[in-house]
Amino acid sequence: MDGLLSSLIKYCVNEELKNSSNISDRLLYKIWNNIFLRNEIHKHILKFIENSIVDLDKSRYDQFKDKSYITTLNWYGDPLPDKNEFPPFLTNLYLYHFSKMVQTTLPNTITTLTLGNYFNQIVPPGSLPNSLTTLTFGDWFNQVITPGSLPNSLTTLEFGDYYNQVISPGTLPNSLTTLTFGHDYNQVVPPGSLPNSLTTLKFGNDFNQVVLPGPLPNSLTTLTFGFCFNQVVLPGSLPNSLTTLTFGPLFNQVISPGTLPNSLTKLTFGQLFNQVISPGSLPNSLTTLTFGYCFNQVVLPGSLPNSLTTLTLSSCFDQVVPPGTLPNSLTTLTFGGDYNQIITPGTLPNSLTTLTFGQLFNQVISLGSLPNSLTTLTFGYCFNQVVLPGTLPNSLTTLTFGNYFNQVVIPGTLPNSLTKLTFGGEYNQVILPGTLPNSLTKLTLGDDLTK
């Protein structure tokens, strides 16, 4: 906003506006060519830039002369101005050290309100303005929210770390779209307590309750579980509207067929998840699948849906992937740090465009093992094998070698499609004439190269 206003100060009106058919253009020309009006506009713009965001307490606020320019007020201390004494255009109010009960109704201009860590008072019905869209409670807040306390304009609500109260049905307004619980929240979610407008729900670290069928609304699209959640996901508990599901680090439960909704497109498992994925467990809508640190199970044929485009395997994963296991829809595949298995022809689908190996991978790349669809190939830290001519597909445009790679690249090895080539820090081999293709536009050499 400040940049826009600064550019307005320097604005030079175009003479063509004088005779424009648009009445707004002609009016702008008349105003901007009036020196008095232009100077007045400049003065107010400069004051707005200087005073739109301020840090004040009650004593300094009483002395402050340019209240009408304030849009964001960072307030320190307990005494608040009376309702009619707030800045007329205030939209964002941050009460960092405020600890007393909200006695007065806040002005209807406010859209964002943050109550700081010291606040732990009951919020009386009617004290929050009907203009409010975003409300954030500080860490110490741990009071019951009564029906009618939160305005029907509210779309985003965030609780602090200590909040751990039951949410009763009718407490949260039907306008709410995003709800975030803090660290300590660990209550059963009753049916009807979450409004049908809710699209994003995030639980804090301590939440570890069974989610029964019914409480999660059919409007929900994004669900995030925190650190401690480790409960069986019951069939019918996740709504058919859900598109993104993230499990926390401790989750390690079997995913049964029919548990995950057919709307799901993105699924992320946490660090400790290490369960076999049975065929039919993952919905055919899934496009992105990420496994956490500990996953090291054989990927069974038919377990990955044909909709999958992006697959990230965990740091611990080091299993043979048989041909036909990876779906033909897959475009991006990332192996974790421990993976060090031979890639046999037919393992990687012809749809694959991006392939990344982890740190420990150090296997010979066999002829025909890399698909002709591949455009980006990244080797990890330890890879140090001779790359034979014909092993890299003619579709490849970007090739990155890791730090340990230090093999002579034989002429004819690099395809004529290659545009970007990166060698690691320890690469120190003679680059023979005819080695680099004419298509190459960017070459990055390692620090050790002296030949």
Image: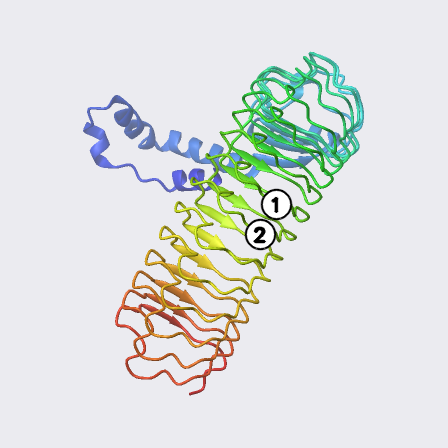
Based on the displayed image, in which of its 4 quarters is residue 206 positioned?
Answer: top right
Q: Position of residue 443 (x, y in %)?
A: 37, 71
Residues tagged 1 and 2 counted as in contact (Cβ below 8 A): yes
Please give the name of the residue rendered at 45% of the width and 42% of the height, measured from the top-left corner: 308
Please give the name of the residue rendered at 49% of the width and 65% of the height, measured from the top-left corner: 342
Quickly name the residue at label 1: 276
Based on the displayed image, in which of its 4 quarters is residue 338 positioned?
Answer: bottom right
Q: Nearer the viewer, residue 87 or 198?
A: 198
SS class of the residue under badge 1? loop
Quickly name the residue at label 2: 298
Which quadrant, please, contains the C terminus? bottom left
The image shows residue 378, relative to residue 327, as above or below, that is: below
The image shows residue 252, relative to residue 59, as above or below, that is: below
What numbered label is drawn on residue 239? Answer: none
Q: CA distance from mark 1 to mark 2?
A: 7 Å
Q: Position of residue 418 (x, y in %)?
A: 32, 66
